[in-house]
Image: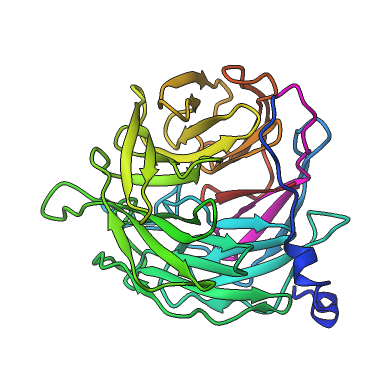
């Protein structure tokens, strides 16, 4: 549904909508800003935003589903050539929340949707304008810059690459141009390798970064890379710098490490990595985290409470805590809740919310973790199973 009141009133001022609470680094013993709601996409034929309210104790309750105006999609399993799930998009960041705005990709219709989050009820979403074409085919991940009022989408199909659009209180402008990645993919693409995994702005929003997964072995051998497009005079440039951090192969979900130019990146071939960026945003491997029992470690978040990173695996039901300086494993929390594994996750105050889409036999869930005890003391407090969520579900975003 389009939010008519938002169009008439211009959704308040854009500054009021976009400005969100900033969480400074604090110890777990200090009072934290509490999350209000979490969001992910159903990624089904009729794509929906699933919005779940957060209770005072950090746990979740039943929420709402709001159509995006587009369709979800599935990458194809290269062995069976059938739609793949879970991890249907093979990405991190299929939706993002900035202030009171929410953005989400629609892989099946090559579109991007934008919503306003209701101030009184954060599970109530109103679409602003109409979904826009992403230029690229099969969009899987997006980035949002509050500073530049710009959102960028990475696509992984036959027309792969990154395109950007301005946003305002009235909605999204048209995408500018496709900054191509020559991957030789199809639409829908063959997954989960050989495509963009995560696109995001760096800490000071001076560059758009994208991790692009490689693929091996030969004859389809391609090298994964870190793509960087600088922001020049408020616009994302079309001049790209690429780097291949030695020792990495399948760079996936990535998050900036606060107070540094470093990144916590996952690599499905071995676990996680601390990537150091130079002035041109070229990446160098600073530390590697080899997780012995991992299968596909592909998603990452950083907690301001613990000052550490957390990574998940779609096929191993554990949460791994990582030192952001050395890459050393602080704790591996093995779960017994029956989930097959977890994908997208987001740290928010004293909590972490991780999506487990389930599979053909296990229902999807969102697992809630408490990190208020500080490093090495993460614990599971809830395994919430929302209704009408299939194994296609993807993404994770939090409203504070």
Q: Looking at the picture, how far across and down is residue 16, in whole percent?
A: 80, 64
234 relative position to 169: left or right: left
Q: Looking at the picture, how far across and down is residue 289, in whole percent?
A: 36, 28
Which residue is situated farthest in the right direction here? 120
326 relative position to 47: left or right: left
Corner quadrant of residue 69: bottom right
Query: Closest to the observer: 57 or 248?
Result: 248
Q: Which residues are magenta?
A: 28-52
> Residue shown at 49%/60% (left/top)?
206
400 relative position to 45: left or right: right
* Image label count: 0
* Residue 110 visible somewhere in the drawing: no
Please tell me whether residue 96 is drawn above or below residue 180 in the rendered image: above
> Residue shown at 84%/34% (left/top)?
56
> Residue shown at 58%/62% (left/top)?
144
* Residue 391 visible somewhere in the drawing: yes
Q: Looking at the picture, how far across and down is residue 261, in whole percent?
A: 46, 45
Q: Is residue 29 magenta?
A: yes
Please tell me whether residue 390 is drawn above or below residue 238 in the rendered image: above
Please tell me whether residue 82 is drawn above or below residue 295 in the rendered image: below
> Residue shown at 19%/47% (left/top)?
216
Q: Looking at the picture, how far across and down is residue 229, in whole percent?
A: 40, 65
Looking at the picture, the colour scheme in use is rainbow
Corner quadrant of residue 112: bottom right
């Amino acid at each position: 549904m389009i939010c008519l009141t938002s169009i008439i009133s211009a959704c308040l001022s854009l500054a009021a909508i976009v400005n969100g609470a900033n969480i400074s680094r604090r110890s777990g013993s200090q009072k934290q800003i509490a999350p209000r709601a979490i969001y992910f996409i159903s990624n089904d034929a009729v794509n929906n935003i699933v919005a779940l309210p957060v209770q005072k104790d950090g746990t979740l309750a039943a929420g709402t589903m709001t159509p995006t105006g587009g369709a979800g999609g599935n990458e194809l399993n290269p062995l069976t050539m059938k739609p793949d799930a879970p991890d249907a998009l093979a990405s991190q960041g299929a939706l993002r929340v900035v202030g009171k705005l929410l953005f989400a990709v629609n892989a099946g219709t090559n579109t991007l949707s934008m919503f306003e989050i209701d101030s009184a009820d954060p599970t109530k979403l109103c679409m602003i304008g109409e979904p826009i074409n992403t230029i690229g085919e099969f969009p899987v991940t997006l980035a949002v810059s509050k500073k530049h009022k710009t959102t960028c989408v990475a696509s992984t199909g036959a027309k792969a690459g990154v395109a950007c659009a301005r946003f305002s209180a009235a909605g999204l402008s048209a995408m500018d141009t496709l900054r191509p990645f020559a991957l030789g993919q199809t639409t829908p693409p063959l997954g989960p390798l050989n495509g963009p995994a995560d696109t995001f702005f760096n800490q000071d929003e001076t560059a758009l970064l994208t991790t692009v997964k490689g693929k091996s072995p030969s004859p389809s051998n391609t090298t994964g890379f870190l793509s960087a497009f600088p922001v020049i005079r408020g616009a994302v440039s079309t001049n790209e710098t690429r780097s291949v951090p030695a020792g990495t192969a399948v760079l996936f979900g990535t998050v900036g490490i606060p107070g540094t130019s470093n990144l916590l990146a996952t690599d499905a071939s071995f676990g996680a990595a601390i990537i150091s960026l130079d002035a041109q945003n070229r990446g160098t491997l600073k530390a590697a985290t080899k997780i012995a029992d991992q299968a596909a470690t592909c998603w990452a978040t950083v907690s301001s409470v613990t000052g550490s990173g957390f990574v998940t695996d779609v096929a191993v039901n554990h949460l791994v805590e990582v030192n952001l300086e050395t890459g050393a494993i602080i704790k591996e929390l093995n779960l017994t809740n029956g989930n097959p594994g977890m994908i997208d996750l987001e740290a928010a105050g004293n909590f972490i919310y991780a999506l487990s889409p389930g599979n053909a036999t296990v229902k999807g869930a969102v697992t809630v973790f408490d990190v208020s005890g500080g490093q090495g003391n993460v614990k599971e407090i809830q395994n919430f199973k929302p209704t009408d969520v299939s194994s296609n579900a993807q993404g994770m975003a939090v409203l504070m």
